[in-house]
Image: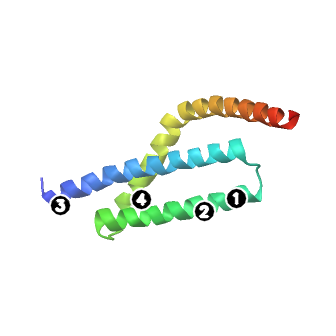
Amino acid sequence: MDESILVQIRIFFYAIFYGGLLIALYDGWRFFWYCWRKRGKKNQVTDMIYWSLAGIALFLFVEWENEGNIRGYLFLGWFLGMLCYWKVLRRLIKRLWNRMAGRLKKIRKAVKIAIERR
C-alpha cells in the first residue's frame, strides 16, 4: 500500500479518537457544571466557550496532522468518534458520574452544614 494512503488512514483513526475525546470532555464539562453550578444562562455561555475551544482544537488538529488540508473523512472520523462514544461508553460513564455527583453533593452539603454551625 502506498505510504500516503497509510498516513491518511492513520489520520482518520486519530480523527475518530479525537471526536470521541471531545464529546467525553464535553460530558465531563457538563458533569462539573451539574455538580457545582446552577443551570441557566451561565451554562449556555460556558457551552459556547467549550465548543469554541473545541473548534480551535479541531482546527489545530487539521493543521498539525494534515497540513491544513480539510478533507471529508476528517469530519466523518470526528462524527464516528462522537457517535461511538455516545452509543457505547456514555451510559457507563454517565452512571459512574451520577454516583460520583450524588456523593459530591452529600459531601458539599455536609461541609456547608458544618460551616454554618460554627
Q: Are marks 1 and 2 in contact (CB under 8 Å)?
A: no
Q: Position of residue 59 (x, y in %)?
A: 42, 66
In 3D space, how far apart are the residues under numbered discs 1 and 3 (Cα atoms)?
42 Å
User: Who comes first in sequence, dot 4 or dot 1?
Assistant: 1
4 on left or right of 118: left
Residue topped by disc 3: 4
At 43% from the left and 47% from the top, the residue drawn is 81
Q: Nearer the viewer, residue 66 or 29?
A: 29
Q: Earlier in the sequence, mark 3 or mark 4?
A: 3
Of pointers 4 and 2, the one earlier in the residue sequence: 2
The reply to whether residue 71 is in sight is no
Report the mark closest to the observer, 4 or 1: 1
Disc 1 element = helix
Q: Nearer the viewer, mark 4 or mark 2?
A: 2
* Cα distance between the residues tagged 4 and 1: 25 Å
Nearer mark to the viewer, of 1 and 3: 1
- Report the amino acid beneath label 2: Ile
Residue in the picture at 45% in, 48% down? 21
Q: Secondary structure at mark 2?
A: helix
Residue that badge 4 annotates: 75
Q: Earlier in the sequence, mark 3 or mark 2?
A: 3
Residue 91 sits above or below residue 64 on the image? above
C-beta proximity under 8 Å, tags 3 and 4: no
